[in-house]
Image (spheres, rainbow, N blue to C red):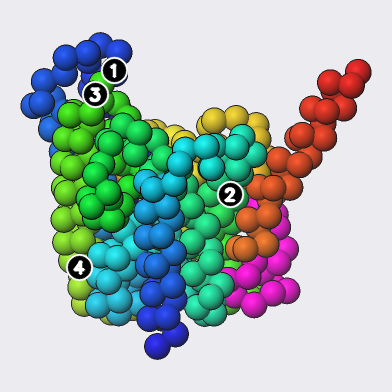
Amino acid sequence: MNAPAPPLDDPPAAAAAKPRSAVVRDALGVGIAVGLSGFAFGATAAGDGISVPQACVLSLLVFTGASQFALVGALGVGAAPLAAATGAFFLSVRNAFYGLRLSQLLRLPTTVRPLAAQWVIDETTAVTLAQPDTATARLGFTVTGATLYVLWNATTLLGALGASALGDPAAWGLDAAGPAVFLALLAPMVRVGGRERATAAVAVVAVLVCVPLLPAGVPILVAALAAPAVLLVRRDRRERGDAR
Amino acid sequence: MTTWIAIALTAIGAYVVKLLGLSVPAGLLERPTVRRLAALVPVALLAALTAVQTFSTGRHLVVDARAAGLAAALVALLLRAPFLVIVGAAVVVTALVRHVAG
């Protein structure tokens, strides 16, 4: 989940009268490809000392991949619950902005909203935004959400059980799964531009400086300040540039 | 127990954020600064998480087999490998380096 979504077959502009089968095909493709990543989450959670029921509850109730990986990673290094949950929470804030876009497209009745909300994540948003009208948007959202939810939870269970059966997760290199996931999620973001690359660089330096100095989990929160810091510096520069 | 507390806090926070997006009027969150910050905070967090989980053990900075694993993931990423292959490369290389070195 939250993996770079595979490119959709039909560009939205060319899909004025998109057949329902094409929407279902796109949605299933994204749902299955990303849903299988639950294996990586289940195995990583086990590697971080999270029990099988805990890993499964996370996938059922949190259901937003980056936050889940961040939480188990922080708990794995002994972070306090509040520090660990705060880092995970910051990672999930973008889902609110997806919800804003989706509510305009899906036009959901008030009664359905609390149910649909659980599926508001990267992948469902990517598929839904590619649809030309409300009917296909609803279809894309529902098929992607259902496929992803079922697969992500099933593979979380299997990954956690499998990794627990292996014994010492570090001997199998499973402690490297978490950082690899974060790198894969980060890559498409830093390709966007200089502001993203500067933020990533500042965050890496900040977190490595803070690790020996602060309790586990806190360095991540300090590193999050790289985002407002870079925004402030860039704005200053732009304003000075405008004044000239 | 503390793990369950962290799980409960994260589950509630993640759900409230999702429901908020679907429910509030668009204008409220559409300020440019808010949107820019929301896009940039995950970049900072993911970069920091990658660094901390590769180069630290407890409160010590270390370079061990995980660094080789992350390098393998980076190569897979540059070759445009699928998500699970990127993660698999990191796991396999880390395990291999540990077995060879240990």
User: Which residue is label 1 attached to?
Assistant: A11
The answer to whether dots 1 and 2 both sit on one chain is no
Residue A206 forms part of the magenta stretch:
yes
User: Which residue is label 4 attached to?
Assistant: A157
Which stretch did the figure color magenta? A203-219
From mark 2 to mark 4, how far is it between C-alphas?
30 Å
Which residue is pictured at 34% across the width and 63% down the height? A62
Instruction: Please give left or right for residue A218 compared with residue A102 in the image.
Output: right
Secondary structure under badge 1?
Answer: loop
Residue depth check, mark 3 versus mark 2: number of the one nearer the observer: 3
Which residue is pictured at 73% across the width and 47% down the height? A229
Q: Which of B62 and B33 is in front in this view?
A: B33
Q: The residue under label 2 is which amino acid type?
A: Val
Which of pointers 4 and 1 lies earlier in the amino acid sequence?
A: 1
Question: The C terminus of chain A lies in which quarter of the figure?
Answer: top right
User: Which residue is label 3 attached to?
Assistant: A133
Which residue is pictured at 31% across the width and 58% down the height? A63
Which residue is pictured at 42% across the width and 52% down the height? B20
Q: Which mark is residue B41?
A: 2
Q: The residue under label 1 is which amino acid type?
A: Pro
From mark 4 to mark 3, how far is it between C-alphas?
36 Å
Q: The residue under label 4 is which amino acid type?
A: Leu
Which of pointers 3 and 1 lies earlier in the amino acid sequence?
A: 1
The answer to whether dots 4 and 3 both sit on one chain is yes
Secondary structure under badge 3?
Answer: loop
Residue B99 visible? The answer is no
